[in-house]
Image (cartoon, rainbow, N blue to C red):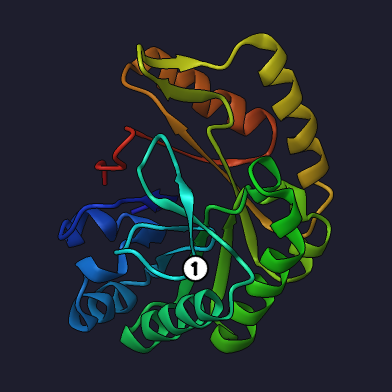
Amino acid sequence: MQRRPICFYYGDGRLEELTGYLRVVLQPDFYQPAELSYLADQGVQTLGYLSLSEDQGPPAPWQRQERNPDWGGAFVQVGHPLWVAHVVGAAKDAIARGFAGLFLDTLNVELTYPEDVPHLITLVAAVREEAQPAYLLANRGFGMLPRLAEIVDGIVFESFSARWTDQGYAPWPPDVLEFHAQIAEQLLQLELDLYSLDYADSPGLTDFAERRARQFGLQSFVSDRALSRA
């Protein structure tokens, strides 16, 4: 059986389906060590999800008042010592439970709190220090390049070609597609694993996203907004 490169799955179970991939991104709380061990025995590299600039938890001293309008999580002060300890602790816990690596999400602080970019680079480096030699996969994080490329093993270009909107799933308009293409060409200069994660609900849009990913040297995965497909 030829396995697909990667799967982003935020549900639980589905172990047999997950064995069809070389690498899978999972929510740490949804999988027990025995399940992670089973996937490892099947040759699947498991990556635990880790948010670095947003917090879905209860009120905490590192949280800002502002929240992500799409997901409801609180933006955080990335450099807050207690947040740093929280994230590094979560990374260590995931590795101790059996994850082979980590998926670093919410890295686009240059769009919300650009003053936090240096703190975020420091946080990613701290995660690397604690988790090595675990595999680190970054979601975007383009505002931290080229430094980010020295710390992580791969980059995911989330919503490279297709996205979800209030009206449904759709391709990006041409000007955004061109801008994303320019970024992809820069990523190809890096010695990293490169992936795309797109959102689609029809065969036509899925095919468009997969073809465009191949065109720019990205290994593709297409799912729904909730990442419920395995």
Residue 38 in view of the camera: yes
Q: Position of residue 165 (x, y in %)?
A: 41, 19
Q: Position of residue 39 (x, y in %)?
A: 28, 72
Work out whether residue 68 or residue 159 is closer to the camera in this orientation and state it: 68
Q: Residues within 10 Å of mark 1 (few under 14, many from 20)?
A: many
Q: Name the quadrant containing residue 98.
A: bottom left
Work out whether residue 120 or residue 182 is closer to the camera in this orientation and state it: 120
Q: Residue at x 63, y 43 (%)?
A: 112
Residue 84 drawn above or below residue 136: below
Look at the image and tell me in which quarter the N terminus lies: bottom left
Secondary structure at badge 1 equals loop
Residue 226 drawn above or below residue 137: above
Q: Which residue is the site of mark 1?
A: 62
Q: Residue at x 84, y 49 (%)?
A: 189
Q: In the rendered view, does 209 fall on the left or right side of 151?
A: left
Q: Residue at x 59, y 58 (%)?
A: 138
Q: Residue at x 56, y 25 (%)?
A: 161
